[in-house]
Image: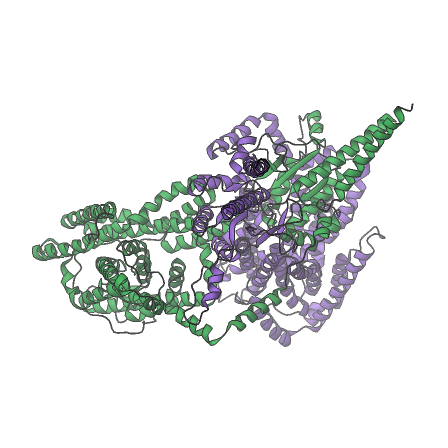
Chain colours: A purple, B green
């Protein structure tokens, strides 16, 4: 008897100690969240919105000093900084060479894109001159070549074409054909008025947006969207040049719906009827020459110091051949026609049709939204909307320019061309200019391979790309832009709608819990289910969460079928398999009211079924919403554990405890 | 000497051992992610999309058995299940009582909402009859009372009003006033045609959506959106009933922009000119009586077994008083007027104006999107669009109904009323019906307190509520619906745009790292910065990530000011403060191509500055995208650690090692 008593005592002690230890473990500060924060102390960092705004204003006001304001103003005129640091010996020669190289590119491209806007080519040269000058003074990046840009030119052309000819001052539609030559100047005048007003509006919108600090909207213009959009727009530009290559008139008034296919049907019949073989020959030859020259330039860039000015050479040779063989008069090859010369004097944009142009301006603003003052000021010099060009910028960087002064030297050359040489290009075949545009589209058109890139990597970005691209080519550039933008928003919602909802298991002997789908060896415990929902829980994915949650813990929410069901199987399914469900909340970046309500509902429903729900790894934002929604009052106080491992340890201890009690009862 | 050697040896051994331990620790499987997965083994759970679809189809095809199909069909006719389980003794009496109670509510409400749609009141009774019958057969919830619903009635009225009177068959606008009485029946006929066609289209769209399993779009209809929308719509309904209360004509053709304010201006002048004092008195008395009766019902619900049928009593008393004092003929009080009786025979909807109604139908479909067949079938019985009503459902549940048969008994009573009693209500003052509608709006109007609820808890849901509510009351119900829906998408993007980006510290001696803003005592280590970005990293928040990231590790990306800068201060800022930056990726639920590119860019930029970037706790989806984008090739192979603590331990070991080497060098 004496022998057994201490033994029993010892056993009892050990059991008690064990329970005590478990309780200790449970009460260790890091286990339950409440005790964890009580022990380590937290602060609530939220300041009320009004106070935050006040602080911001105060900060801003305190910073307002004379030096500060002058610095801000001087900061905008970047050429001061540039001249201050200018190292004549090191930079000057490189800048002059680069300026000349870029100017040589500007001349043919300016004329080509000028024609793309349906204006005379000289206006393209204006756009290659004034914005470059302004960017030299106010710009920041020495390698960016501003000026004409294919997609913008196309959008300008659309704005011009949309205003009906009848509304042009003094031009009556019936007498249009008769008075064609007489009113040509007037039509051009009106068109220039529209284009410059558009440039002014675009500049104004850009300034307003940057003043209101709304530049953040650019983040909605995501890469797949840009890629899809510009590829589609490039196809539009490409299509617009095909008539010039074949020397036929461009089909007019193509309806917006399925625009490109219809355009090609019309174009094909027009080509079959009116093809000009000489123009076609010139066009294809030009494309091939330019393409080969570009390839050579690319390949031998590192060896040669100077880039072959293939476009300028083409323009000069084309003009000469056309002039001496009288291509236009004898063979009916469409040529550029008379070009006026000289720089325009400043004049205000016409401001006609503003209400009509405001949508176009908004569309173009979306497309650029970065170049502020340049558009607005240059609109006073008969310039249409302009922006930076990637292909020219690449050349500008490659030709070794060092500072913003590259633009100045480029303007010098262009100014001379505009003032003196433009009339010489009269006999340049249109097909040459079309070839220049087409070959320059290479980069944009080759973006079509992004299709496969996104397909391989990211389904959602792939959908965005394809939707933007398809609407752009099937309908119109502006429709593509807006549909793409809406798709961006929609995708951000869809993305979070059906996230991965996984069962976790403990990896080896670590405290790390991973998806059993990826780590098949991760260990799961009887009676304990650990789940992780890989997204913030909110209204748009709450229904999915609920359905999937019950599915994962093997509770059927559906009714039994009406006929022929096997009772046994169902009863087995309705058996409760788990006593504890732990939801790892580490992926929850926020939770909204709908999400909290759902968690409370599930907690109470599971409780009725004899299952306890615990949360772990909730972040402070989530905890704050839970608190505001009275989550703790509506469930149990200790529902949140700090880490998943703590929760699992606590659950395992509880299960052991239950088992011991059960054993004790059985023993008795 | 002999004494020192073993001592040095011991020290050496200890140092060696330490380094060895560090290496061991570094090579421990859980440290670097690659070794972790090599040790514990992973599988790639992704099956290709096509294979997944195939599996789905196979699963579906295998399940296709005769029993399965019959079960699916029988499942739809829910009354079979109900009758099978029907317990006569237990349910029958309760169902009959509940049926009568609901019918008593249906009669006055049906008439009132019928008038709200601008149709004669009998059509409201039809909607209280046929859909209830259909829901009894096909429905699922025994407590749901389908039938007329205020906001739907208003939307039907809008659809009817939008089709201009001139288009009504055979009615000439000029002779409208003269032939008013003659063509009344024709106008009503036309209006009924529009309403039933609308109901048919809504039902069709609901069926198509549910057939295409597009029910998931309902998740976009979030709670704050519903709350804001129905509150705004309730204010529209409320406003529409004010003319009836004052006995004046409702203002017509109010422009959509700022609709309600303009409506009230017009209404006020109309009331001042034409107010009918007796109608006003009846209206206000009715509202007060109904309101008090409702309060009493609510308070003594538990004590009394039967609910006072206040609305029916009001209708009967109103009719009697009006009849015997000849309110209409003597005092010009607007009354209901002649009502035909009898149930309509089935007839096809008119299908006129379908193109006009399709938008309205889409709007209404969005608003319900749950009741499938009911709308389509009941459109053949001259019913306008219908849905469940919350207030009536509450009564139906409160009156103790047990099964779907409640609807049957309710229909029995309603059928008798429709067949025999409707003409008796001829002299019922309109003000009484208006009072019924207004008092029933109580619940919807009181949702306005959600404004404060969301304001307190969630800024984004608050914005959604206020935008939906404001556009609904300022413009129109349908505009509010669509603007609210777009706002839902926009908000899901904005939400993820500027997430919390926090500096973490080790909490006590645990392996847990928490925001130092919430846990001010959390410990940070010299030379190591631990950051956590609380959102998935993708195109829309990548610019924010970049800016904030450099800010948090004290690297200035901006240029120095032009004048008056203190060189010392800046140089101090440009000093590198950290050797290792650890980015805790646990909140990243996905990463897109833009995000990966940014991480690669930052990694390489930091490397140039002598800082090493490490990631920790990346989930498998993120790892997969990193892999596809060749992240590991473009950075260093061991960039990812399993947990933040592992990364910190490794960094600390490296720093100690560096220090030791430095010490050794100094010693030498």
Residue B543 showing in the rendered view: yes
Q: Is residue A233 above or below residue A51?
A: below
Q: Is residue A443 left or right of residue A608?
A: right
Q: Residue furthest right?
A: B1
Q: Position of residue A88 (x, y in %)?
A: 79, 36
Q: Is residue A97 above or below residue A336?
A: above
The foreground one among A578 and B187 is A578
Displayed quadrant of residue A59: top right
Q: Position of residue A252 (x, y in %)?
A: 56, 67
Q: Position of residue B382 (x, y in %)?
A: 28, 69
Q: Is residue A410 above or below residue B408?
A: above
Which residue is depicted at the point 13% across and 49% down?
B278
Count of picture labels:
0
Displayed quadrant of residue A73: top right
The foreground one among B105 and B78 is B78
Q: Is residue A284 left or right of residue B271?
A: right
Q: Is residue B281 left or right of residue B173?
A: left
Which residue is depicted at the point 72% across and 41% down?
B605
Q: Position of residue A246 (x, y in %)?
A: 67, 70
Quadrant the N terminus of chain A occupies: top right
The foreground one among B439 and A368 is B439
Q: Is residue B344 left or right of residue A203?
A: left
Residue A589 showing in the rendered view: no
Q: Residue furthest left?
A: B324
Which residue is depicted at the point 49% across and 75% down?
B65
């Amino acid at each position: 008897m004496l022998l057994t008593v201490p033994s029993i005592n010892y056993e009892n002690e050990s059991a008690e100690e064990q329970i005590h230890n478990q309780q200790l473990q449970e009460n260790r500060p890091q286990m339950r969240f409440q005790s964890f924060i009580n022990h380590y102390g937290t602060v609530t960092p939220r300041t009320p919105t009004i106070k935050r705004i006040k602080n911001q204003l105060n900060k801003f006001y305190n910073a307002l000093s004379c030096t500060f304001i002058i610095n801000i103003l001087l900061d905008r005129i970047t050429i001061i900084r540039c001249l201050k640091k200018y190292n004549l010996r090191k930079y000057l020669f490189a800048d002059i060479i680069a300026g000349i190289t870029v100017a040589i590119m500007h001349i043919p491209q300016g004329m080509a894109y000028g024609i793309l806007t349906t204006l005379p080519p000289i206006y393209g040269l204006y756009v290659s001159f004034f914005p470059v000058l302004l960017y030299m003074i106010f710009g920041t990046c020495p390698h960016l070549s501003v000026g004409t840009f294919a997609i913008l030119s196309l959008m300008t052309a659309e704005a011009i074409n949309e205003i009906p000819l009848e509304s042009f001052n003094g031009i009556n539609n019936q007498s249009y054909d008769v008075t064609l030559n007489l009113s040509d100047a007037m039509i051009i005048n009106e068109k220039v008025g529209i284009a410059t007003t558009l440039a002014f509006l675009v500049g104004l919108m850009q300034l307003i947006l940057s003043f209101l600090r709304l530049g953040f909207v650019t983040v909605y213009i995501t890469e797949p969207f840009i890629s899809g959009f510009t590829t589609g727009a490039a196809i539009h530009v490409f299509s617009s040049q095909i008539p010039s290559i074949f020397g036929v008139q461009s089909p007019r008034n193509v309806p917006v719906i399925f625009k490109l296919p219809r355009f090609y049907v019309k174009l094909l019949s027009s080509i079959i009827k009116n093809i000009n073989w000489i123009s076609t020959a010139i066009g294809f030859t030009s494309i091939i020459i330019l393409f080969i020259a570009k390839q050579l330039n690319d390949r031998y860039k590192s060896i040669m110091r100077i880039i072959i000015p293939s476009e300028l050479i083409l323009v000069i040779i084309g003009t000469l051949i056309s002039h001496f063989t009288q291509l236009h008069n004898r063979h009916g090859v469409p040529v550029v026609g008379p070009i006026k010369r000289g720089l325009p004097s400043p004049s205000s944009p016409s401001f006609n049709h503003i209400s009509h142009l405001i949508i176009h301006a908004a569309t173009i603003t979306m497309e650029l939204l970065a170049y502020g003052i340049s558009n607005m000021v240059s609109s006073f010099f008969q310039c249409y909307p302009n922006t930076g060009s990637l292909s020219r910028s690449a050349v500008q960087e490659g030709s070794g320019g060092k500072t913003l002064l590259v633009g100045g030297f480029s303007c010098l050359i262009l100014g001379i061309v505009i003032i003196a040489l433009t009339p010489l290009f009269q006999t340049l075949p249109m097909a040459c200019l079309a070839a220049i545009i087409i070959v320059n589209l290479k980069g944009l058109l080759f973006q079509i391979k992004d299709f496969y890139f996104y397909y391989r990597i990211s389904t959602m970005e792939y959908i965005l790309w394809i939707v933007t691209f398809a609407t752009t080519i099937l309908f119109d550039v502006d429709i593509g832009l807006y549909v793409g933008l809406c798709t961006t928003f929609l995708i951000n919602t869809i993305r979070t709608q059906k996230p991965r909802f996984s069962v976790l298991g403990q990896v080896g002997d670590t405290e790390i819990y991973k998806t059993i789908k990826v780590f098949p060896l991760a260990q799961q415990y009887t009676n304990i289910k650990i789940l992780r929902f890989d997204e913030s829980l909110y209204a748009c994915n709450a229904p999915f969460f609920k359905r999937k949650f019950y599915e994962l813990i093997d509770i059927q929410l559906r009714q039994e079928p009406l006929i022929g069901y096997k009772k046994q199987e169902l009863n087995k399914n309705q058996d409760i398999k788990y006593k504890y469900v732990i939801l790892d909340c580490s992926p929850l970046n926020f939770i909204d009211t709908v999400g909290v309500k759902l968690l409370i509902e599930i907690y109470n429903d599971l409780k009725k079924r004899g299952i306890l729900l615990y949360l772990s790894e909730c972040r402070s934002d989530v905890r704050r919403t839970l608190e505001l929604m009275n989550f703790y009052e509506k469930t149990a106080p200790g529902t949140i554990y700090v880490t998943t491992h703590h929760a699992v340890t606590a659950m395992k201890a509880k299960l052991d405890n239950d088992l011991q009690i059960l054993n004790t009862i059985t023993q008795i």
